[in-house]
Image: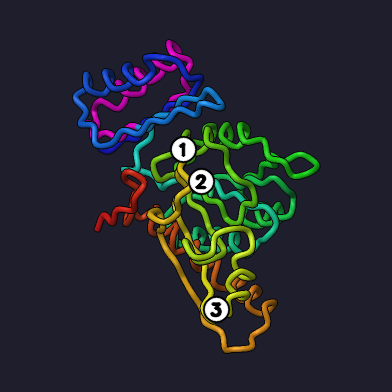
């Protein structure tokens, strides 16, 4: 089985060695190691991807816990080779309901072979969706909508979340959160075609240069801000010359964005694509 081990914590010497020694002693084959020091935050981050015999899973978990206690690192072990259950999703949203609704409906219809375990938001706008689909709801934002990022991760840990789905979640996750769920576990919808139209107003940016084709991008979030190699799915639509920007945005938000995200999440939970060294790998 493939396992992903992430470790995040205060930076000091000798943090990587215990993890590497642990997995090699368990007979694991290491297929990927990434490490990063956030000097301005004194933060150490590490991802290790290994192949390990299924009968050593408990040993890995116990060893990771021991290393965590000894080093002060926040360590998680997770496998994308999920058996005997459906993958568990945390759906994060802020204002717009179209994309989270589409994911919830696709789960309910069986189009996405997963379980919608929780909904998380920094606002209250999508709470009725959670009630409609009978999904536990958690608000992690203050009165101004500033999110408690540690609370988000704690909720995901407590509910044994496999994939975090950012369905027009209008907050940027900090590096520590991204590293904790690194390795292809955070799926984002961007409401524009990457890499051509990043930023907060991709429809308007494309309209300003007289584009007639608009789109959305479903991609993995990785610690490095480079969306070019992590694209899971893109979908587009074309408009006639002279189409007003309001009509373009409405079509994108109500039709194209939901379809793009649903197909992207479906591909991930079905195991059709994975992330390896921050690049998409097709498994089929």
Disc 3 element: loop
Label at residue 164: 2
Q: Are marks 2 and 1 in contact (CB under 8 Å)?
A: yes
User: Closer to the N terminus: mark 3 or mark 2?
Assistant: 2
Gap in Å between the C-alphas at discs 1 and 3?
A: 36 Å
Label at residue 105: none
**Highlighted range, magenta:** 48-76
Residue closer to the observer: 42 or 80:
42
Disc 1 packing (10 Å; few <14; some 14–19; many ≥20): many
Gap in Å between the C-alphas at discs 2 and 1?
A: 8 Å
Circle 1 sits on which residue? 181
Label at residue 211: 3
Disc 3 packing (10 Å; few <14; some 14–19; many ≥20): some
For the C terminus, the quadrant is: bottom left
Residue 161 in view in this figure: yes
Give the residue displayed 50% in from the left and 66% down from the top.
193
Give the residue displayed 40% in from the left and 45% down from the top.
184
Locate residue 102, reporting x and y percent.
Answer: 56, 64
Disc 1 element: loop
Locate residue 248, reporting x and y percent.
Answer: 63, 77
For the N terminus, the quadrant is: top left
Please tell me whether residue 87 is drawn above or below residue 74 in the rendered image. Answer: below
Give the residue displayed 34% in from the left and 53% down from the top.
280
Q: Residue furthest bottom?
A: 241
Disc 2 element: strand
Q: Main secondary structure of the magenta part?
A: helix
Q: Residue furthest right?
A: 143
Disc 2 packing (10 Å; few <14; some 14–19; many ≥20): many
Locate residue 72, reporting x and y percent.
Answer: 48, 15
The answer to which quarter of the image holds residue 3 is top left
């Amino acid at each position: 089985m493939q396992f992903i081990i992430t470790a995040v914590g205060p930076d000091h010497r000798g943090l990587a060695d215990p993890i590497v020694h642990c997995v090699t002693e368990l007979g694991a084959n290491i297929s990927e190691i990434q490490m990063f020091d956030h000097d301005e935050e004194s933060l150490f981050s590490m991802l290790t991807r290994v192949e390990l015999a299924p009968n050593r899973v408990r040993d890995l978990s116990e060893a990771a816990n021991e290393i965590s206690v000894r080093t002060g690192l926040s360590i998680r072990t997770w496998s994308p080779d999920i058996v005997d259950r459906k993958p568990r999703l945390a759906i994060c949203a802020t204002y717009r309901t179209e994309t989270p609704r589409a994911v919830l409906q696709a789960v309910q219809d069986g189009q996405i072979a997963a379980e919608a375990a929780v909904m998380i938001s920094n606002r209250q706008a999508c709470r009725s969706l959670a009630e409609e689909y009978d999904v536990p709801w958690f608000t992690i934002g203050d009165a101004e909508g500033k999110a408690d990022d540690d609370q988000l991760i704690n909720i995901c840990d407590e509910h044994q979340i496999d994939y975090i789905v950012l369905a027009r979640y209008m907050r940027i996750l900090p590096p520590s959160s991204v590293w904790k769920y690194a390795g292809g576990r955070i799926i984002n919808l961007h409401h524009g075609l990457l890499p051509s139209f990043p930023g907060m107003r991709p429809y308007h940016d494309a309209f300003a240069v007289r584009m007639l084709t608009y789109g959305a991008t479903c991609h993995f979030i990785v610690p490095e801000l480079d969306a070019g190699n992590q694209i899971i799915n893109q979908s587009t639509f074309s408009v006639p010359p002279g189409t007003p920007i309001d009509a373009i945005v409405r079509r994108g938000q109500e039709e194209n964005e939901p379809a793009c995200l649903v197909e992207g999440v479906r591909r991930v939970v079905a195991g059709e694509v994975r992330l390896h060294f921050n690049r998409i790998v097709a498994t089929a």
